[in-house]
Amino acid sequence: MQCLRTPLSDLSVLERQRTRAEWQQQGQEQSDYHPYDADFCMQNLLPVETSFRALHSCSGGGANENHGNVHGSNDCFSNAWPDIVSSMHCPVVGAAASVEETSVNASSSSSSRKRKSENTRRSKENSGGSDGKDDSNCKRIKEETGGGAAPPEAKRPNKRKEESADASKENDKAPKSDYIHVRARRGQATDSHSLAERVRRERISQRMKYLQDLVPGCSKITGKAGMLDEIINYVQSLQRQVEFLSMKLAAVNPMMDINIDSFFGGREINPTCKSGIIPMIGMSSELLDQSYLQFGSLQHDMFMDSLDLLLRPNVNPPAAVSDTSLGSCLNVNGSSVWNTNLQNVYGVEFQLGRGTALPFQSLQGNLLPNNLKMEM
Amino acid sequence: MTISNGDGDSAAKDGRRERKRKRRAEPSLVKWKTEGEQKTYSSKLIEALRRVRRSSATGAASAATDHSRSRAVREAADRALAAAARGRTRWSRAILCGRTLKRRVLPRAGRPKPVGPARAAERSKPPALKTKARVLGRLVPGCRKLPLPSLLEEVSDYIAALEMQIRAMSVIAEALSAVGGAPSPAQTEGPM
């Protein structure tokens, strides 16, 4: 079959070889066409190809898959090939475009199922946890038809580059979004597994989007793996914070005054507590500082670093504290959680310690318990 | 994010199908942000703290090391948080019923290899997503063997709850330390 290779500018040697193998297996009479070789078949197939494409673009059917898969990986689709190829070759002999369409469409549904199962298996092998089975397969096919970069599977022969380079022009005509949509529709029609998978993937992506809003700093990250990393880091930092705060509470606990519960729950304020709080909240920064030193440098996340940043300069030169330093610290954190924490912690102190209306007074707003606010 | 496959049509269909399949509404995370919820939690937490203090006071004071005390406080805080969740989420239920069970179950000899569908290729190269999902499942209490979509839901609720917990605890710590600092104003007032 050496002569096959020479005139080929398009569709494949490999396809030929494959089909030949299939035919020999199945013992179809069409193997008789092989001696005619490439030239005959190729000449007839090229127009077939273009007509296929035209058909595909207007029908948007699963025949598109066939076309895409022609440039796809060889091995898995080998099972699906006989249907398509036989259907393609009958019309080659007959040279009737309409026959091609119907035969392709007829076989495509049956072959699509097989191909899908092959797809999923292969994508699991190769993609290794990419977005989705269908998607990864689509992407792979597009990569190849995009032509340039080294194909992910090293086993592909170099001839594929030529084919894909040529095929890329044609395949680009078929819009990629339609490709996915088409698959979805057909998948829904035939395969309950792919339907379930699609639903599952949709759900996952919905939840990931939701989490993206929840976790600060995730808007730039695309891709599930990176998002999961961020989420993991965030949950770990939150848990570490809880640990730290619980340690602080445990240290402070023995000194706890019973009247504390008047601060919360909107009950009446104990006047003694009120007078006790006002001068003392000004000391809170010192206490926090001491407690921070006491518990050591357990925490290295943003929260404690920012606390440190704010504590040191603010405690010693209280007059020199400007809005800018706090503002910059608050901006550094860049997340609402830290902002609320910091405002809770420091806004109170500044309000009482200075008695001036500072900008973060308004920021605090509803963050502090009502009773504390009233005391200011 | 470029994760979602299709637009409009298939997504809508899937959404409808999904709703038909399971009529469970997504738990709203707004409740963790409300001030009322924080106050409720704070009062619950203070009660728990008082209990912890009493229990540590009645017990041997020497036995109550800093570490054990902080652990007790932390567990009380988590249990209060789980109670505030009203048991609608998996992690809250796990915290409420599982605190003692977890310690016994922990020394498990060797993880049984997860039997996936008959795909040998998948086992040879576990997708990074799966391992990360497992790590995440270990972080959130009670969500170890959860599949990814429900895990993500639990995680979002857990994150919101944790944030509220941190806010409340910092406020309480602030207030407590302020009141606790009352007897010694002289030293601290110097540098100011």
Image (cartoon, coloured by chain):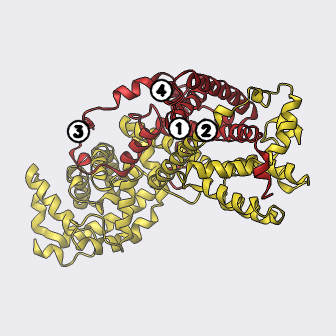
Name the secondary structure under disc 2.
helix
Residue type at tag 3: Ala
Measured as percent of width and height from the top left, residue A67 is found at: 34, 59
Q: Which mark is residue B118?
A: 3
Residues marked 1 and 4, same chain? yes
Chain for mark 4? B
Residue designated by label 1 = B66
Chain identifier of the red chain? B
Q: Position of residue A276 (x, y in %)?
A: 84, 37
Give the residue type that dot 4 points to.
Ala
Cα separation between marks 1 and 4 = 26 Å
> Given contact means CB atoms under 8 Å apart, are the residues at marks 3 and 4 in contact?
no
Q: Nearer the viewer, residue B42 or B8?
A: B42
Examine the rendering and report whether any part of residue B186 can be seen. Answer: yes
**Quadrant showing the N terminus of chain A:** bottom left
Q: Do circles 1 and 2 both sit on a common chain?
A: no
Q: Is residue A2 above or below residue B14?
A: below
User: Which one is closest to the eye, mark 4 or mark 2?
Assistant: 2
Q: Is residue B167 above or below residue A46?
A: above
Q: Which residue is mark 2?
A: A251
Q: Given the image, on which type of amino acid does mark 2 rest?
A: Ala
Q: Which residue is mark 4?
A: B94
Structural distance between the alpha carbons of marks 1 and 2? 7 Å
Q: Look at 16% across and 60% down and name the residue there.
A: A18
The subunit letter for the residue under badge 1 reads B
Q: CA distance from mark 1 to mark 3?
A: 51 Å
Mark 1 or 4, which is nearer the eye?
A: 1
As helix, strand or loop, the secondary structure at mark 4 comes to helix
- Quarter holding residue B27: top right
Contact check, label 1 and label 2, Cβ < 8 Å: yes
First along the sequence among labels 3 and 4: 4
Chain letter for the part of the structure drawn in yellow: A
